[in-house]
Amino acid sequence: MEDVFRLTDDLGPAKVIHIYEPKLKLRAILVVDNVACGPSIGGSRMAPDVSLDECFRLARAMTRKNAAAGLPHGGGKSVIFADPKMPDAQKETLIRAFGRAIGDIKDYIVGPDMGTNETCMAWIKDEIGRSVGLPREMGGIPLDEIGATGFGLAASIDVAQEFCDLKIRGARVAVQGFGAVGMHAARFLAAKGAVLVAASDSKGTVADPNGLDVAALIAAKKDERGVADFGKGKALDRDAIVDIECDIWIPAARPDVLRADNVGRLRTKLVAQGANIPASAEAERALYERGIVNIPDFIANAGGVICAAVEYRGGTETGALQEIDERIRRNTREVLRLSAERKITPRAAADSLAGERIRRAMSFRRWTSPGLPVGA
Ligand code: NAD
């Protein structure tokens, strides 16, 4: 009863499965965390340095995100220990074998994550008839192409205006990580009249207090240029994005970028978390104490998984955008209202909201302890 159960608590995980196929050198882990709300949805991450703990943390984050978004899905995640840049034929064999291995785990619906993409999901669907984040030709809604998560972030920021001294029209925006999430968030906010004053990527930062041309910066990025090579604005080092004076600061890159040692440098009114777990608990507390409104990750960045859930039940792109807008607005309002009313951090409010929904869903199930399949 020792080590293998060290991760369990009152929510889960329901199942932890090791997958090993020596002939193919397939090594993977699947964590199905909690399925009280329905079969779990969560991405499959391929990287050489993934771990069981990372898989569990990400699965738990999906449990909270899906419950908070009111989706009929629990949370799960899988990791494949491999280099995602391996030759295509080898990757196809590995992904198909992984798909076969999870075929019988019906309470896990796999989607794309770092190192996997819509083609990988098409291979898995072909093997077991079940996956999300599919190519358009297979009924998929390409969530990164349409900017599902950036669209949801912009909706959450729209609502946050009610809770801080902020008007999107004319607001100065800084985006850390000008990738799929960051660039679309900038695009949707610019359409509402905001001004992008800085953006960064893994190589550097570009800043212009008078505003950067968002469409031109997206085109440059798609050309494989770094934002610091944009040619307009001032090129700065990567970390300079933290010091940019702005009204809205969006982390959309890596985990743990805001910590106790650097959060004091932020000069903003609002932080809207596009990345997963971008701020430590100490950093979030410091934001709260300084009166900076902070929309937690699983509330603000749920656009992608809402889109995947709509795709799974055969919905359309228009329907997905409507649902993202509606669900994220409602949740952001509820979390920020609860935070103000109870004088707790937005993170504590979001955890409480998600926790209540999960526990209530669990109360409807025959098995009160997680670990048994839905409907068993
Ligand atoms: P992406 O790879 O498209 O973009 C990431 C961007 O961040 C790239 O431009 C990269 O150069 C930049 N970057 C990397 N390290 C950086 C650093 N240290 N400083 C500044 N920039 C850095 O990835 P994405 O899909 O946009 O995802 C970004 C984050 O959002 C990830 O944490 C991801 O887990 C999370 N997320 C993504 C989605 C989605 O729908 N894609 C949904 C929810 C959460």
Image (tube, helix red, strand yellow):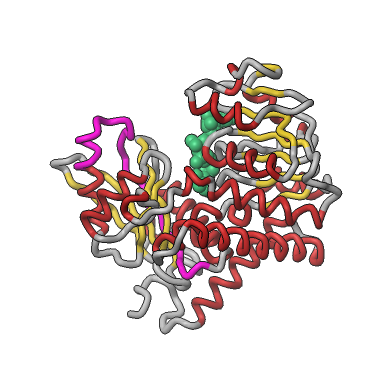
Residue 173 is left or right of residue 1, and the answer is right
Q: What segment is highlighted magenta in the picture?
A: 71-93
- Quadrant for residue 203, please give it: top right
> Measuring 43% from the left and 53% from the top, which residue is drawn there?
141
> Is residue 261 among the parts visible in the rendering?
no
> Measuring 67% from the left and 61% from the top, which residue is drawn there?
329
Q: Residue furthest right?
A: 165
Front residue of 6/322: it is 322
State yes or no: residue 108 in magenta: no
Residue 154 is left or right of residue 1, and the answer is right
The count of marks equals 0
> Measuring 45% from the left and 67% from the top, which residue is drawn there?
73
Q: Quadrant of the C terminus?
A: bottom left
Q: Position of residue 347 (x, y in %)?
A: 68, 56
> Measuring 31% from the left and 44% from the top, which residue is drawn there?
119
Q: Residue furthest left?
A: 23
Q: Quadrant of the N terminus?
A: bottom left
Front residue of 277/8: it is 277
Front residue of 251/352: it is 251
Front residue of 348/247: it is 247
Q: Position of residue 182 (x, y in %)?
A: 59, 38
Residue 372 is left or right of residue 290, and the answer is left
Q: Position of residue 307 (x, y in %)?
A: 49, 57
Q: Position of residue 65 (x, y in %)?
A: 54, 59
- Quadrant for residue 334, please give it: bottom right
Vertical order, 115 against 19 (above or below): above
> Is residue 108 among the parts visible in the rendering?
yes
Vertical order, 42 against 147 (above or below): below
State yes or no: residue 83 in magenta: yes
- Quadrant for residue 129, please give it: bottom left
